[in-house]
Amino acid sequence: MHADKKKVTRLLKTAQGQIEGIMKMVEDDRYCVDISNQVLAAQSLLKKANHEILKAHIDGCIKAAFTNEQEGDQKIDEVMKILDKYYNM
């Protein structure tokens, strides 16, 4: 992985902490809207982490594939499949 590992790890650990907090909120029967807001915040962190990972993939692997005339189309197809999943959520 060519992404900034410290940044991605920090985002994922923060999301993990939020998810643990959300689980506690559910167990404590907290107000639904408060829980929903925390779910959205965790999703936002996961999106940011995924953005960093995909950006690094494009800047590294995909550029290299085209520069070295290797599997460029395959790399684009991989990213497109991920984007399809993202937009079909």
Image: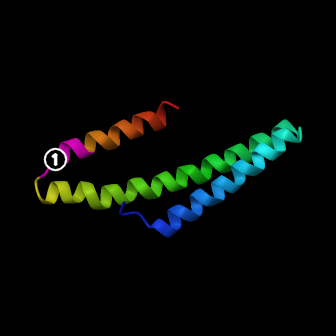
Can you identify the residue that label 1 sits on?
A: 71
Q: Main secondary structure of the magenta part?
A: helix
The residue segment tinted magenta is 70-75
Is 9 covered by the magenta stretch?
no
Rendered location of residue 43, percent (x, y): 62, 46
Q: Is 44 situated above or below 80? A: below
What element does badge 1 sit on?
A: loop
Question: Does 51 appear above or below 34?
Answer: below
The scheme the figure's colours follow is rainbow
Task: Determine the image quadrant of residue 58.
Answer: bottom left
Q: Residue at point 39% right, 40% down?
A: 82
- Taking the view exactly as shown, the residue that stands out farthest to the left is 69
Q: Residue at x 83, y 36 (%)?
A: 32
Relative to 76, is 12 above or below? below
- x, y percent for residue 59: 31, 61
Locate residue 9 relative to residue 82 in the image: left or right.
right
x and y percentages locating residue 9 in the rendered image = 54, 63
Looking at the rendered image, the quarter that the N terminus falls into is bottom left
Check disc 1 and give the amino acid type. Glu
